[in-house]
Image (cartoon, helix red, strand yellow):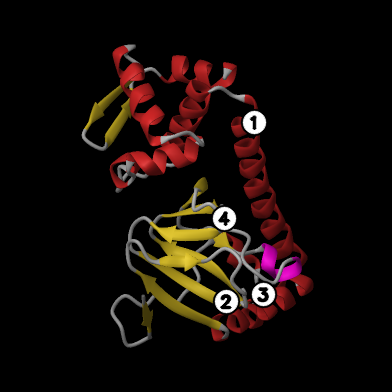
Amino acid sequence: MKTITEKDSGFICDIQSPCFQVLSSSECESIKESKTQILFRKGDMLAKQGVFANYVLFIIKGISKLYIEDNSGKNFNLHIALPGEFIGLSSVFDTTTFDYSVQAITDCQVFLVEKEKMKSVLQGNGRFASGIISRYCMLNRILLNAVHCSQFKQMNGRLASALMYLDSKQESENELFSLLSRKDIAEFAGISVESTVKLLKGFESDGLIALDNKSIVILNKEKLADIAERG
């Protein structure tokens, strides 16, 4: 983890996301004055479940994963966070701690914005607040879908759903599956690593996917989507 200052070549002065474009010049300056820009290295923790949160994170560059931790040491992966997304929005109005952990899958460049400053801008700018609420609702839909999969789908349906979700998060500059271990994929599906490896080989035998080391290429999205839907 490294703090990036204006003297560093990697510093990004302007707030790039469309959601910030509705801010007035004074509101934009208020956000800029309260932020700290951090470079998280691959594997670093951006946020830790249960730890006090006095800031909101905004991802400029990089990919990270959101997950919840169990007391037994097991993890359940919830979401792949991409550039332009916020982390820790619930801490602004609701909880005082992070509800989940976030780990960098690649190097991540992030703004840390003081949550009280974020709250003040949200209360004074309805258009900005509407955009943030929309993002928060999107994340809630993802979490509810994860709960539905884990409770009502069989293992092949869970894995198919996880593969379809991860494939939707692919970026042109990053082949997401090559960045994830089989354990990561298993934790997105909520099944064991052993079951994940076995089912992946079964999907490959059925011509649904192609496996090449860590890389996974979906060959038949329609059939895989059908398995995900039927569970």
- Determine if residue 170 is in view: no
Question: Mark 2: which secondary structure?
Answer: strand
Find disc 3 in the rendering and name its residue: 118
| Badge 2 vs badge 1, beta-carbon distance below 8 Å | no
The foreground one among 73 and 210 is 73
Question: In which quadrant will I find the C terminus?
Answer: top right
The crowd level at tag 4 (other Cα within 10 Å; few <14, some 14-19, many 20+) is few
Of label 3 and label 1, which has the lower sequence position? Answer: 3
Question: Mark 1: which secondary structure?
Answer: helix
At a point 77% along the width and 65% down the height, the residue shown is 126
Question: Mark 4: which secondary structure?
Answer: loop
| Residue 113: assigned label | 2
Labels 1, 4: front one: 4
The foreground one among 63 and 54 is 54
At a point 30% along the width and 83% down the height, the residue shown is 8
| Residue lying farthest to the front in this orientation | 72
| Residue 71: assigned label | 4
State left or right for residue 218 relative to residue 37: left
Question: The magenta stretch spans which residues?
Answer: 90-94
Find disc 1 in the rendering and name its residue: 151
Image quadrant in which you'd find residue 43: bottom left
At a point 34% along the width and 17% down the height, the residue shown is 202
Q: Amino acid at mark 2?
A: Val
| Badge 3 vs badge 2, beta-carbon distance below 8 Å | yes
